[in-house]
Image (tube, helix red, strand yellow):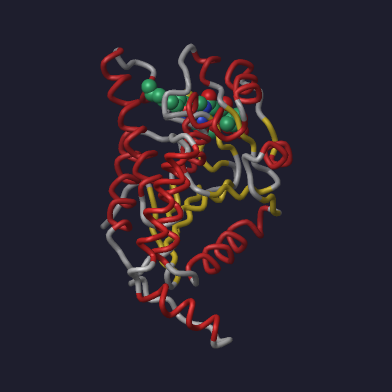
Amino acid sequence: MIYENILVEYQDQIAVITINRPKALNALNSVTIQELTDSFNELAGDANIRTIILTGSGEKAFVAGADIAEMSDKSPIEARHFSQLGHKLMNLIEALPQPVIAAVNGFALGGGLELAMACDIRLASTNAKFGQPEVGLGILAGFGGTQRLPRLVGSGRASELLFTTDLIDAQEAFRMGLANHVYPKEELLGQAVAMAKKISSKAPIAIQLTKSAIVKGENLDLLSGQGYEAEVFAQTFSTEDQKNGCKAFLEKRTTDYQGR
Ligand code: CO8
């Protein structure tokens, strides 16, 4: 598929999606949100792709937020629709069979941070900056920021970021648990690919079910989460990969997982 605002590249079992509006610091307009939705939907059905990396083009930004120029004149009804369009994309990322790594290569603000938070893992470059500037524009973090940020960093720290609009740097994001690792800018994508390769070498169905247990577990009490975990644990025992993986360990050899 040809896209206007994103690039999709493939490296073996890894897909790299690059948001490509560098002149607008990769701001999310509705076309970009729709293209991201379409590309993730396409990748969801591609069993050859085991891990996805999401990043931004240019020197400065991952994503500097929703497109303020497009958004500013919306009516309340249009704003709700825009918010729902964003939610649909973020929820799709969480529901994907493959893990998604956000390679945050600069500003991740507003909708950009919300997009990164919908990914499973966030890696940051040293120049990355994170923040939720929305209340400084008279709006609020309407792509899931009021929900995902407190879940990720706790309500006190989330409230501070959401109320003050202060930006934090990559090291602070790392300390809060918002970024898993921080790398020099020129190493970020390579490190993301290295992590994606490691993930892609494991059993894909086990990874998919682990992801779904993590995502689902966020919204469940411990006992219900354990109930779901037992279900998906059982499901792995109907896969060839479980038989081969356990057998390979006992025979002191490695195996290539087939995703079945
Ligand atoms: N939307 C549209 N255009 C943008 C955006 C944006 N979010 N961010 C930057 N741009 C554009 C600038 O307008 C500028 O364009 P031009 O060259 O045509 O003037 C270009 O990108 C470069 O930006 P700057 O010149 O401002 O670059 P600086 O290095 O000086 O500053 C900043 C970089 C600090 C990132 C600055 O651009 C900035 O503050 N951007 C806005 C950040 C922001 O407020 N983001 C939150 C947006 S709101 C949001 O995300 C809501 C999500 C939930 C929506 C719910 C829907 C109901």
Question: Looking at this view, is 122 or 222 the one in front?
Answer: 222
Q: Residue at x 64, y 48 (%)?
A: 180
The number of numbered badges drawn on the structure is: 0
Q: Residue at x 31, y 20 (%)?
A: 80
Q: Is residue 108 above or below residue 8?
A: above
Residue 21, picture quadrant: top left
Image position, residue 244 (x, y; %) = 43, 80
Image position, residue 220 (x, y; %) = 44, 35
Q: Quadrant of the N terminus?
A: bottom left
Q: Residue at x 41, y 46 (%)?
A: 227
Image position, residue 210 (x, y; %) = 45, 55
Image position, residue 255 (x, y; %) = 48, 82
Q: Quadrant of the C terminus?
A: bottom left
Residue 251, picture quadrant: bottom right
Asked if residue 102 lies left or right of residue 158, the reply is left
Q: Residue at x 48, y 27 (%)?
A: 147
Q: Is residue 139 above or below residue 46?
A: above
Q: Is residue 230 above or below residue 62?
A: below
Question: Looking at this view, is 98 or 129 the one in front?
Answer: 98
Q: Can you see residue 68?
A: no
Question: Looking at this view, is 48 or 11 the one in front?
Answer: 48
Q: Can you see residue 105?
A: yes
